[in-house]
Image: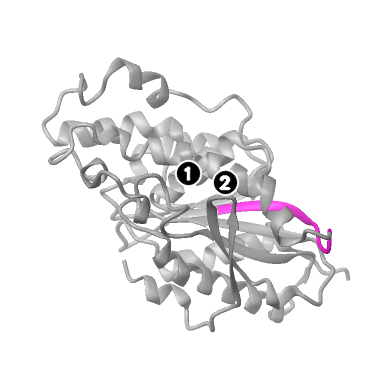
Amino acid sequence: MDYPALTLGHREPSKRTLDLVDLTVHVYGLDEIRNSQLPISVIIASHGRCNSVKNMHYFAVGLCGELRRLARAGARAKTHDVLVVTLVRGRADHRNHGARLKHRTANLAFDQNPMHLLAPLTPPVGAVQDHQFIIEFLPVYLFPNDERVVTQWMATGISLGGNTVWRLLAEEPRIRIGVPIIGLPPDSFVKYLSARAVSAGLKLAPPTFPASLRPWMEKKAKPGAYDGKKILTLHGAGDELVPYRYGQEDIRAVLAAAAEGEVEIWVQDGVGHICSPEMLGRTAQWFWRWGLSEPKQA
């Protein structure tokens, strides 16, 4: 994946690093809003499997830059300031990633790791907890004198991070707007990971698929979990690592239950398991439309 291309040529925004106890985050865009009194929306962005937050820097630069561009264009009225948050290498990467890495083989595919089913399942479960911790305590660290108010939380992520966003949308009521990128909802895990195991010549039996793992793998979103949520899900038509076809039925069910325009699916032709510059551009447009602006009054 060409991460530097995700800056889209934008200049780097301000970046501040904060320790929320032992959870460390980068906060992008704080200096740019210091003279404003608008309410704040925070976008939390998380990385993919076998990756780390260092590459999400390019993503954050591009996302902040695109949001500034959309605000300058003036087609809609700005309602919120925005901060972009990434989890810092070494202390707040996904579980078993970056300098949190303890067991390298645990992140590898079935040919080197017979318990590969855990690799895409357990880190999003832990990441949801980290996101909830950020939601609870980041405003306290940023604004100890109640200088500003965070009123809205949004989420995006790539691959494993996209799986995390889907899980947040299903389980965390404070995340109302999300853009999962090359990820699938929890309801689709059995289909796509089972197919991955079978293609590797493995049987869906212990240790590949122990009975104790089945409740997590087969867990379904609660009825109405996505009601009212604004979801843009982005995929590559050539993605064979996390193929859209294994999540299509579940994602289309979310689309069918939503109000018109509140859920969108975009599958990019000629693209595999990557976040493309076009995907990043659409991510910015989605957050701008639903979380940061409103139509101008006539």
Q: Main secondary structure of the magenta part?
A: strand
In this picture, residue 258 sits left or right of residue 99: right
Q: Which numbered disc covers residue 164?
A: 1
Residue 254 picture quarter: top right
Label 1 sits on a secondary structure element that is helix
**Residue 58: x, y in percent?**
45, 72
Amino acid on which disc 1 is placed: Thr
What is the distance, in whole Å, between disc 2 and disc 1 at their CAs? Answer: 10 Å
Q: Are marks 2 and 1 in contact (CB under 8 Å)?
A: yes
Toward the viewer: 40 or 294? 40
Quadrant containing the N terminus in the rendered view:
bottom left
Instruction: From the viewer's side, name the closer residue of 274 and 96.
Output: 96
Q: Please give the residue where the numbered disc 2 appears in the rendered image.
A: 131
Q: Residue at x 69, y 80 (%)?
A: 73
Q: Nearer the viewer, residue 88 or 66?
A: 88
Is 181 located above or below residue 219 in the figure? below
Q: Quadrant of residue 83?
A: bottom right
Return the residue found at the far right: 298
Q: Check disc 2: other Cα within 10 Å, few if <14, some if 14-19, many if 20+.
A: many
Query: Is 86 on the left-hand or right-hand side of 269?
Result: right
- The residue range painted magenta reads 146-155
Query: Which of the image's four quarters has the C terminus?
Result: bottom right
Q: Is residue 217 above or below residue 142?
A: above
> In this rendering, does residue 255 appear at all?
no
> How busy is the neighbourhood of tag 1: few (under 14 within 10 Å), some, or many (20 plus)?
many
Q: Amino acid at mark 2?
A: His
**Position in image of residue 42 (x %, y %):** 66, 58
Q: Is residue 188 magenta?
A: no
Name the mark nearer the viewer: 2 or 1.
2
- Return the x and y of residue 111 as percentages of the image width and height: 13, 40
